[in-house]
Image (cartoon, rainbow, N blue to C red):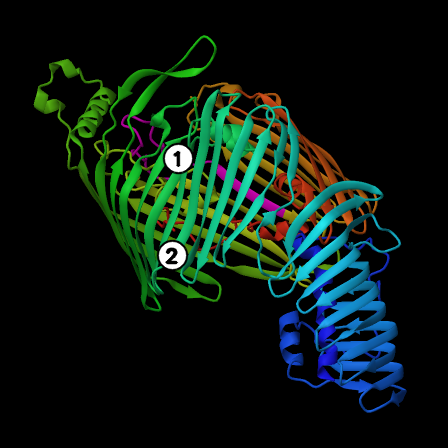
Amino acid sequence: MRRALRLLPLPLSIAVCLPAMADDKPLNWGLCPATEVIPAFTDAPTPVPGQDKAAASAEREQQPTDIEGDQLLGTTTVPQYQGNVALRRGDQFVGTDKLSFDTDSGNYIADGNVRYQDSSIRMVAKRAEGNQESDTHKITDIQYQLVSRRGNGDAESVDLQGAVGQMHRSTYTTCDPSQPVWKLSAPEIEVDNDEGFGTARNAVLRIGKVPVLWAPYFKFPIDDRRKTGLLFPQLGMSGRNGFDYTQPIYLNLAPNYDDTLMPRYMSRRGLMLDNEFRYLYNGGRGELLTSYIPNDKLRDMDRGRVMFNGYHNVDAHWQARANLAWVSDERYIEDFANRLVGVTASNLQSTIGLYGTGQDWTAGIMADRWQLTDYTLTESALAYNRQPRVYFNWDKSLLPWVETSLYAEAVRFTHDDINLKTQNSDGEYVRTGEVTRMYGGSRLDIKPSISFPISGAAWYVTPTLAYRYTAYQLDRGLADSIRSTVLASQNVDTSTLTADQLRGNTSPTRSLPIASLDAGLFFDRDTKIGGKSFLQTLEPRLFYLRTPYRNQDDLPIFDTRDFTFSWGQLFRDSRYTGADRQNDANQLTLALSTRFIDQTTGKERFSASIGQIQYFDESRVTVTPGGAPVEEGKSAWIADSNYMINDRWTLGATYQWDPKYKREDLASVRARYLMSNDGVVNLSYRYRINAGAAANATKEERTLLEQADLSFLYPLNERWSLVGRYYYSIQDSKPLEIIGGVQWDSCCLAVRAVARRYVRNREGELNNSIQLEFVLKGLSSLGQDTDRTLRRAILGYNRDDLYLVPPSNTGATRDDYDPNQIP
């Protein structure tokens, strides 16, 4: 009787074929009035929690079939079971009112209240009959419910021949049968379990009673095996691109690589062909993205892009990585990016290298190149290419109180020549044909250090001594250019100098010691506020830095910039990002932090920090010769605080106040309110001064940015919610991005309609777009990916995203950022 169960797995294969393209987004099933369309059968085996279909199938193959019933009639060759007939084999169960089986011919009939259940599906049918010898079966009047994931449906009949089956007049939905908001139906579906795919003819997707999608013929996978075919399209509308339609075509080329072809039609631009090729093997993986649009109607030119990202594990310590990018023109990213970062991006970086890591070391050899993507700029805005760069990091604790480290780097810097531009009468930037030659050079930077960390339960003291040696080999043109700049800063009349006096040093060097002392205390006490018990900490910290002055005007600037003054800058041993400058210093940082920790929950309810640098001497090293030094005295105050009023309200603020000019250099205020029904409201204000502005500049002249940002997800009720964002530049008196939308969520269908108005180019022109998405829960989605847009614009739109935000970095900690540590 083991073969009598041959029919049982096939209804499962047919039933799961329709939801094979299930959506991966987190879904809200809470609005569904019923979760069990077909209740579990009380006399069926209890499924093993967490056991998947493959494991259950493998286990049942080794088990016998048990049959029982109220009565056993018939003959030895044609037994008939009647009344509460039950067949069990592993996780499988079949129940029926009557079962007869001819052991000679292989014919069987299960009649009346046929029930089937395993770890993946429950099914009821009116009748099942067939022949085990020929492996043919027919099941009529079927209803089914998926157990491993949500979904249910019915079928008029199923015909099975071995591994091939035909399903007639079948349906699938994830809705409750009493509320079929959407339903997928097909008059005929053929399933091949051996090949792992199904074929549907004249399938129709209905939302309510309205047909919204018809497919005369398509194939689809019924298991984890991937199949070539069409994916759901993407639709959109914008003022810049017009009607926007993308039809992805998936090509399953091999088990370890595939390709997705994405023809995209934009009514105002033309036809674009996007492509995504992916590969995977034991030692690595990669992805190649390409785009091509012949004769973009808005630009009257052929355009495209190529992007590659991948890695290969050489061994346990070394990995080869590549991240390559190229676009056809300087406007490409601005035109085809739908985020503000596309407007502000001025370059693309391509990197390839071999990287290693061990217990105490990291190392690498790599090369990179920059491409200009801002039509308003010239190549002078690009960083130097590093071709190649070799680096080595070593950190080792010799004793509990002795730590040593070594950082070494050798780089060859190159740069594209500068093609000069001018702005014509139409406001367009065009090349003049003039080219300025850019020279490069090589740099060796070595920085060994030794630290003596000493600490107790409530204190720590860490003296550190480092030595930095930097040497260059410069092209003659760059060395002479640096010499001219130095002489100009000294107001020297170069016409009176000889040729030798105008020649720059092609092999400049710099060496100097760097000493620092980092010390801190930790105090805590129990306190009560409003009847609640808190642990309050008080964490003072001192950081002293001493570095002698070295004249560095004859050194080039390859990759060095000033750090933005922030909390982390209070505890760094250099105020520059690269090795081309090392500032002189005789300074002391004083900082104080406090925290209030709820003793009941362990949550940090309040934290605040304040700090300032005292400069005992003037710091004369500057990025450019003749630049303004850091004067003796006090730096700006830096203060930061975060207050969790309760589990819903969170407030935060960061503030920098310059006592010398009696002005704020930076101000940031942020607030978040979490509603009980998954709603969220975010409000922030940001202001930052332009550090390069003159001391007597007006507020408008010294303002780098001043922005306000409001975003929200506001549920009106359990089905309807509003979403929005208003991102406004106070400095420019214009919006940067406006989003307004509405969401409707039901048991098994969600609809999002979003309107956007956002800055689309560097001239500040705005683009309008409309995004519409139908999320068929348990199947897929139709339209554009509004979820990605809203998660970017509204922090907390997906509540889990809040836990990805890094914590405040203002606490008293010794995790000082080393600008030379390159991942």
Q: Residues within 10 Å of mark 2 (few under 14, many from 20)?
A: some
Of all residues, the one furthest to the front in this rendering is 105
Would residue 234 be visible to someone looking at this image? yes
User: Residue 159, how many percent across, how many down?
Assistant: 76, 64
Circles 2 and 1, Cβ within 8 Å, touching? The answer is no
Q: Residues within 10 Å of mark 1 (few under 14, many from 20)?
A: some
Sequence order check, earlier mark of 2 and 1: 2
Q: Quadrant of residue 53?
A: bottom right
Compared with residue 547, is residue 485 higher up or lower down, i.e. above or below?
A: above
Q: Which residue is mark 2?
A: 312
Question: Which mark's residue is nearer the viewer, 2 or 1?
Answer: 2
Dot 1: element: strand
Q: Nearer the viewer, residue 3 or 821?
A: 3
Compared with residue 798, is residue 122 higher up or lower down, i.e. above or below?
A: below
Residue at position x 71%, y 78% in the image: 133
Q: Nearer the viewer, residue 704 or 520?
A: 704
Residue at position x 23%, y 30% in the image: 439
User: Residue 426, how many percent across, how many down?
Assistant: 48, 10
Q: Which residues are magenta?
A: 615-642
